[in-house]
Image (cartoon, rainbow, N blue to C red):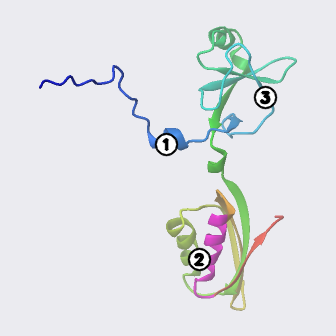
Amino acid sequence: KNKIKRTPSYQPENIQKEEISNNFDLLVFGVDQDKLDYKLSSCCNPIPGDEVFGFVTINEGIKVHKKDCPNAISLQSNYAYRIIVAKWIDSSQQEFKAILDITGMDSLGLTNELTKVISSNMHVNIQSISLSSEAGIFKGQVAVVVRNNTILKRLTDNIKKIDGIDKVTRVYKN
């Protein structure tokens, strides 16, 4: 017997895994990605994940518009000096500065080993580093940029494994 095979008239969309898991929950402004107070404009109702820009109003602070907002062209051409770059980011991807005090026995190559563990092995960015040695004992402070305290804990544990390192503590005020 002949059977009619039915296929759906629509093709299911291929949704990338990262599209589902990306969590654009924080709006930041400018090159430095500052967190500023803002209001969402009612003309285009932007939602997290939309391409947006900030418009500095006279009385209402920063109003956020979608890049394809009906008012965008007018605002950008007439008031370009009041436009501020804005974008949605995943706040779990935000990075934070942490400062570590490190002490131990000074030895040849210790600084190299320390920076290798931090940058190469852990892929953590060093913001600043200051080390000094006196009578065979070194003291140092390293400012690193991490995404969360789990990475920081793993980093401190790995630093403690370096020969000659006695103590690694987090500093809460610099």
What residue is rendered at 60% in x and 27% in y?
A: 50
Q: Quadrant of residue 29?
A: top right
Query: Residue 58, percent across and down?
Result: 85, 17
Q: Which mark is residue 158?
A: 2
The residue under label 3 is which amino acid type?
Tyr
Q: Which residues are magenta?
A: 150-164
Mark 1 element type? helix
Mark 3 touches mark 1? (CB < 8 Å): no
Check if residue 138 falls in the magenta segment: no
Q: CA distance from mark 3 to mark 2?
A: 41 Å
Q: Nearer the viewer, residue 3 or 11?
A: 3
Name the disc covering residue 54, or none. Answer: none
Point out the image quarter for the C terminus: bottom right
Please state which of residues 107 and 157 is positioned toward the viewer in this rendering: 157
**In this view of the protein, which residue sits in the foreground, 153 or 10?**
10
Q: Earlier in the sequence, mark 3 or mark 2?
A: 3
> Whole-Å distance between the Cαs marked 3 and 1?
27 Å
Circle 1 is placed at which residue position? 18
Read off the residue under disc 3. Answer: 38
* Secondary structure character of the magenta stretch overall: helix
Direction from residue 4 to residue 34 in the image, left or right: right
Residue extending farthest to the left is 1
Q: Position of residue 113 (x, y in %)?
A: 54, 77
CA–CA distance in space, label 1 to label 2: 30 Å
**Residue type (three-letter) at the residue carrying disc 1:** Glu
